[in-house]
Amino acid sequence: MNGDFSRAVNITWNRKDRNLLPLLHQEVCEAARKWSLDRLHQLAVLAFTYPKGRPRDGLEILADGDDFPFLMTTLIFMRSFVPTKWPSANQLQEARAVWSGGMAKARKIQ
């Protein structure tokens, strides 16, 4: 996009689903166009800071909301969805505050 990787997101796919990468790539690109990279990064930071398990668990909880950038079937193929660079102290603090405010608040912030 503009070469700025400070808000890049790392998506790792299940190895057994690699044959689906062309389709998954199209969906991720469409989500980036529709949602913006900033919102996807914010979602990745929220998932990364999920306090009660792995980031993947946090992503599944966020996916239960009304507005989510990926199809639920796509979520099944993801192993991880996290920020590429370690979030700043401020980003971590904000994301943790969202989770401490409850799941409804976390879903709403997306």
Image (cartoon, helix red, strand yellow):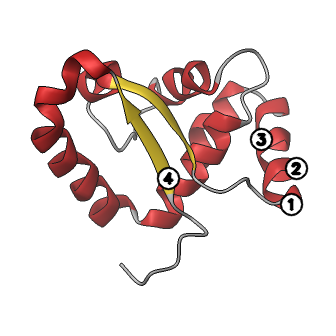
Secondary structure found at label 1: helix
Q: CA distance from mark 2 to mark 1?
A: 5 Å
**Of label 4 and label 3, which has the lower sequence position?**
4
Q: CA distance from mark 4 to mark 2?
A: 19 Å
Q: Amino acid at mark 2?
A: Gln
Question: Do the residues under discs 2 and 1 have CB atoms within 8 angstroms?
Answer: yes
Q: How many marks?
A: 4
Q: Nearer the viewer, mark 3 or mark 2?
A: 2
Say the numbered circle drawn on residue 53: none
Q: Nearer the viewer, mark 4 or mark 3?
A: 4
Circle 1 is placed at which residue position? 90
Circle 4 is placed at which residue position? 9
Relative to 8, say whether 96 is above or below.
Answer: above
Find residue 68 and report its image quarter.
top left
Q: CA distance from mark 3 to mark 1?
A: 12 Å
* Residue at (29, 61) in percent of width and height: 34
Q: Amino acid at mark 3?
A: Val
* Residue at (13, 30) in percent of width and height: 20
Say the numbered circle drawn on residue 93: 2
Q: CA distance from mark 3 to mark 2?
A: 9 Å
**Of label 3 and label 1, which has the lower sequence position?**
1
Q: Nearer the viewer, mark 3 or mark 1?
A: 1
Circle 3 is placed at which residue position? 98
Q: Is 41 left, or right, of 106 in this rendering?
A: left
Percent position (x, y) of residue 18?
A: 19, 28
Q: Nearer the viewer, mark 4 or mark 2?
A: 4
